[in-house]
Amino acid sequence: MTTVHERVDTFHDNDQKPVGYGRMLRKEDPRFLRGRGRYVDDVQLPGMLHLAILRSPVAHARIVSIDTSAAEASPGVKAVVTGAALAAQNLAWMPTLSNDVQAVLATDKVRFQGQEVAFVVAEDRYAARDALELIDVEYDVLDPVIDARRALEPDAPVIRDDLDGKTNNHCFDWETGDEAATEAVFARADVVVSQDLVYPRVHPAPMETCGAVADYDAVDGKLRLWSTTQAPHAHRTLYAIVAGLPEHKIQVIAPDIGGGFGNKVPIYPGYVCAIVASIVTGKPVKWMEDRSENLISTGFARDYIMRGEIAATRDGRILGIRTNVLADHGAFNGTAAPVKYPAGFFGVFTGSYDIEAAYCKMTAVFTNKAPGGVAYACSFRITEAVYLVERIVDCLADELGMDPAELRLKNFIQPEQFPYTTKTGWVYDSGNYEPTMRLAMEMAGYDELRREQAEKRARGELMGIGIAFFTEAVGAGPRKDMDILGLGMADGCELRVHPTGKAVVRLSVQSQGQGHETTFAQIVAEEIGIPPADIEVLHGDTDNTPFGLGTYGSRSTPVSGAAAALVARKVRDKARIIASGMLEVSVADLEWEKGAFHVAGDPGRSVTIQDIAMRAHGAGDLPEGIEGGLEAQICYNPSNLTYPHGAYICVVDIDPGTAQVKVRRFIAVDDCGTRINPMIIEGQVHGGLTDGVGMALMEMIAFDEDGNCLGASLMDYLIPTSLEVPDWETGFTVTPSPHHPIGAKGVGESATVGSPPAIVNAVIDALKPFGVRHADMPLTPSRVWDAMRGQARPP
Ligand code: MCN
Ligand code: CUM
């Protein structure tokens, strides 16, 4: 059993060791800890102007008129731009990452509170903000659609009348699985349990809000754009397509990013406004949104209304799972998912269980709320899928009177069944679930906890134990199946070893805090034996890195991590040939070990990778046909996704007098295959678990009936602090991915995916004495109180 509370002094020091994997302090941290990070808002260019956006105060209204004259006359103002002005340049609308269109600035109507209506460019931030107040917009207010359940009613106001012939609020339908086969297993099941569940709209709320600095040089025709993006290359190509410019005339730079969590995947109107403003004024222009703007207008997450049904035999064999989902996509379909997957990877809702049939039918609708959908460490909607399955499995356990751990253990896909094709067509690459579950139970002291709970229940105390077991699909994805707006989901990687044996690896993915500068150096180090300290990781600048689709869906390790390993092997292959010349033996007679080749059977005759690097660039002949230099490049197209899994156990206590939930313990056992840097993995898991506490107990973007966003500041939109979270107890198992060159699977979203159902299951377990079978997140004291009293508040 491995629990982790090791001290820092047990870290091995990779400066001394040539090998790569293991605990290693993050290379980027000295910069961050000393306040030397360079974020978008730190970019200052000579003559730079500032842009502020006027946003709609109402959720749904026709724009009657906009008067900008007073704003234009305001001191320091250089330009005021409206939707009408953009429309004249054919720039008022832009494509979203889901083949919809979104208004850059509203022309006809505003469709959510906070929507972009006009912008001001001024000499400083204050002048720009002040001038916003002087813009006079006349709105003809329309009835809004706030509840997704209202959207498809025949008399609901039509939100997207900009779309040709659109007469309703339907966004898309999607289904997966086999409806008839599922009906058949439900018909013959002993037990069928169904439960309505709402996964509320939540916000990733990164520390750094979104922003950009655009600098268009009219002389050389080049646009430089510093922006808060998780996918610089994908953004650049989309700008190139929209603007009709060649990619080499656009440089997108994602400098240090203060957290992304999916918030920074979409292209926001503000980025486009900054570009337009720079072109119009001939000056660099900065746009940086404030916290309220970020909370009300940028990519939200979830907002799924689900009905889950599960069919089983009396002795607890799960036969089938069926679900009906109403997805609220807001005013524009601004979700970012591979084209063939409008519901992201929700199709993995069958979870970690070997079942006979499954079916999902989903309807997505437009409402008068901000666009988005895929964010907040969601693994492309696997959050919602895992919540659904792990909640209804618990409902089933309750119905059967079975222990929820036992029910799960009884239904797991077995190790010999991998690769396992689910009933919705996903091919799980590898997994060994029972040991992971058993380890979590052992760490938790599961049986002892149940005994403690029984004693407490007898005394009227409310203690709950919640389990969630998840399988994720991360690492999008094979190009044959996955693209975003026609861009295949592969990643480039380049590795250059300099004459002195120091190296630079260039990635197409982009870190927002995940520690790529460290872990990608470790991956390369493991393969070519150059210490990680000597390997510089470059990312986030399209002029200096190879093309690839960026960081989201925990795809960096599964896709770019594979690319980094393979490019390093390519360099090693060349190094081997050069070594054979240096040692005057054939390639077959060389053995590789820890950064050096030696003659087989004669370890004394060896050359290090550093010797080889110098020879590759230096004096003396190279073997026949070998060019100078020591570098390689690659574009990696994954053959499948990777499927990490994990077992989470949460223990809560509920104060019967106040209904306050306290997460007392949380045990998380994760299996992400080969572990590159266990310390970084733990950091990812700690962060995701904290997010889970937020979603399960505190967070929700709520609206009033007029569509006013009620969570527009961090006073109203609650996010967890250290006070709400316990001392996390983490463990791991290792089931390598069979198709990944180093066997690694992604982990960046595992804990966010797995923890909400564990916490909710624990709360519901605590409320058993009240006969409660379900209550919707966030389980705030008022909701728990209502549940204890047999009432349910509308979500
Ligand atoms: N890692 C490892 N061994 C593994 C798997 C991962 O050491 N077997 C390391 C990686 O090398 C990387 C980190 O763990 O340094 C996360 O890797 P991965 O799972 O590949 O995820 P990504 O790097 O693609 O990060 C994306 C993921 C997503 S989609 C969201 S959302 C999220 C998350 O990462 N946003 C984050 N974690 C975040 N963490 C921080 N600090 N900030 C965010 O914005
Ligand atoms: Cu869904 S949030 Mo992350 O994939 O950037």
Image (spheres, rainbow, N blue to C red):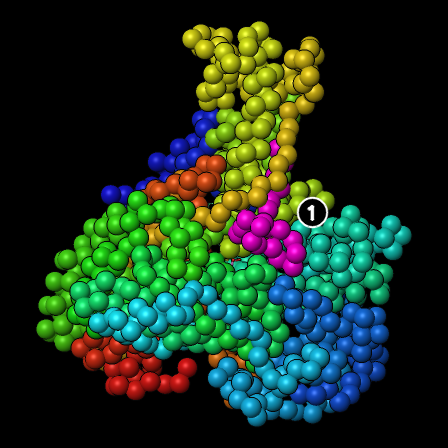
Identify the residue shown where x is 36% and y is 68%.
182
Q: Is residue 321 left or right of residue 589?
A: left
> Which residues are the magenta region?
476-495
Residue 484 is covered by the magenta coloring: yes
Inspect the image, locate mark 1, and give the three-letter code of the amino acid beneath it.
Thr
In the image, residue 102 above or below residue 378:
below
Q: Is residue 135 left or right of residue 629?
A: right
Choose between 468 and 18: the one closer to the eye: 468
Q: Position of residue 416 (x, y in %)?
A: 30, 44
Q: Which residue is mark 1?
A: 542
Identify the residue shown where x is 29% and y is 49%.
414
Residue 376 visible to an observer of this rendering = no
Residue 325 is covered by the magenta coloring: no
Residue 456 figure quarter: bottom left
Choose between 75 and 146: the one closer to the eye: 146
Q: Position of residue 11 (x, y in %)?
A: 38, 36
For the image shown, how many numbered marks are present on the structure?
A: 1
Identify the residue shown where x is 84% and y is 64%.
281
Identify the residue shown where x is 34% and y is 53%.
646
In the image, residue 668 above or below residue 574:
below
Q: Is residue 335 left or right of residue 378?
A: right
